[in-house]
């Protein structure tokens, strides 16, 4: 099923959300990925707005948990516990929306975690175990996303992401654009983690940075990547509705 992320929603409030959902529906998309970030977090108060708009147009939903200022691998207990509390609340609300999945970011590094790699990995994995328990408790799939190239970000390779999730009942969200900025080893990622993938993010870039361009506007080798992707939910994680429309045209030209 192909959908669109709220990265393509430019509103500073949810006033225009229903109209934007209507436009997404008109493109033939099947779901919306609610991105719980400022200025439109998924909260107990905003839940009805999201639910009513999506139900009005018969669209499914996936959820991207908050990631700015969140760090499930923090050495600071209060920051890590607050981050986990926010993710648990997001999973609970996503379950009420009957979302197909929740995507989370892994923890990220700091000067202290760079010097204490073993302890950082231990705490990081314990956080993921807790999230996996909530995934089971609320009956909703959770995927840990691979990150783009940036010095402090974790899980930039399939080997590192596998190390984080090994032996934990949690899924993976495969971000194709992010992989294009790191190793570019798409087939290797799919071989190593393909069975864990519960959700996919589609967007393009030059290979130098995370640009979230329309498909075909960058250097991702889509003709090779698309046939290998698992048959799950694919979200166009582009910058606006027009980029989504052009992405769909690009997919049609590839006979996809």
Image (tube, rainbow, N blue to C red):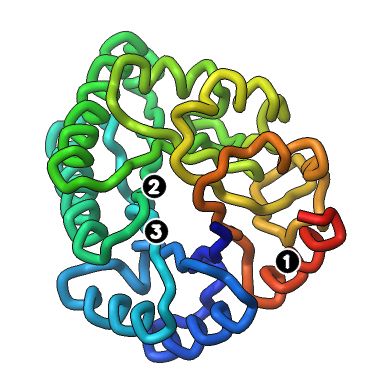
> How many marks can you see?
3
Where residue 165 sits: x, y (%)? 36, 22
Q: CA distance from mark 3 to mark 1?
A: 19 Å
* 186 in relation to 213, above or below: above
Neighbours of disc 3 within 10 Å: few (<14), some (14-19), many (20+): many
Return the residue nearer the eye: 232 or 64: 232
Where residue 128 sits: x, y (%)? 26, 29
Return the residue nearer the eye: 180 or 21: 21
Q: Quadrant of residue 52?
A: bottom left
Q: Which residue is mark 2?
A: 103
Q: Are marks 3 and 2 in contact (CB under 8 Å)?
A: yes
Residue at position x 84%, y 54% in the image: 254
Q: Earlier in the sequence, mark 3 or mark 1?
A: 3
Q: In the image, is 199 to the left or to the right of 177? A: left
Q: Which mark is residue 248?
A: 1
Q: Which residue is mark 3?
A: 62
Q: Of helix, strand and loop, which one carries label 3?
A: strand
Neighbours of disc 2 within 10 Å: few (<14), some (14-19), many (20+): many
Q: Quadrant of residue 114?
A: top left
Neighbours of disc 1 within 10 Å: few (<14), some (14-19), many (20+): many
Q: Quadrant of the N terminus?
A: bottom right
Residue at position x 13%, y 39% in the image: 78
Q: Nearer the viewer, mark 3 or mark 2?
A: 3
Q: Which mark is residue 136?
A: none
View extreme (right): residue: 253
Q: CA distance from mark 1 to mark 2?
A: 23 Å
Q: In the image, is 204 to the left or to the right of 128? A: right
Q: Earlier in the sequence, mark 1 or mark 2?
A: 2
Residue at position x 47%, y 40% in the image: 173
Residue at position x 40%, y 36% in the image: 144
């Amino acid at each position: 099923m192909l959908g669109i992320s709220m990265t393509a929603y430019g509103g500073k409030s949810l006033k225009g959300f229903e109209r934007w959902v209507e436009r997404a529906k008109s493109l033939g998309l099947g779901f919306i990925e609610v991105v719980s970030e400022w200025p439109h977090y998924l909260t107990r108060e905003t839940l009805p707005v999201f639910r009513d708009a999506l139900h009005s147009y018969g669209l499914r939903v996936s959820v991207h948990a908050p990631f700015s200022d969140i760090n499930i691998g923090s050495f600071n207990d209060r920051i890590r516990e607050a981050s986990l509390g926010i993710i648990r609340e997001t999973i609970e609300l996503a379950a009420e929306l009957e979302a197909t999945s929740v995507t989370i970011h892994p923890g990220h590094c700091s000067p202290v975690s760079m010097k204490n790699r073993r302890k950082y990995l231990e705490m990081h994995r314990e956080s993921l175990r807790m999230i996996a328990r909530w995934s089971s408790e609320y009956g909703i799939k959770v995927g840990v996303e691979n990150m783009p190239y940036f010095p402090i970000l974790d899980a930039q390779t399939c080997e590192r992401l596998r190390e984080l999730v090994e032996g934990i009942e949690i899924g993976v969200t495969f971000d194709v654009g992010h992989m294009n900025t790191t190793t570019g080893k798409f087939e290797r990622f799919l071989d190593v983690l393909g069975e864990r993938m519960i959700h996919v993010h589609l967007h393009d870039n030059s290979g130098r940075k995370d640009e979230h361009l329309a498909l075909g506007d960058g250097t991702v080798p889509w003709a090779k990547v698309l046939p290998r992707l698992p048959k799950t939910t694919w979200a166009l994680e582009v910058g606006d509705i027009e980029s989504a429309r052009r992405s769909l045209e690009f997919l049609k030209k590839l006979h996809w």
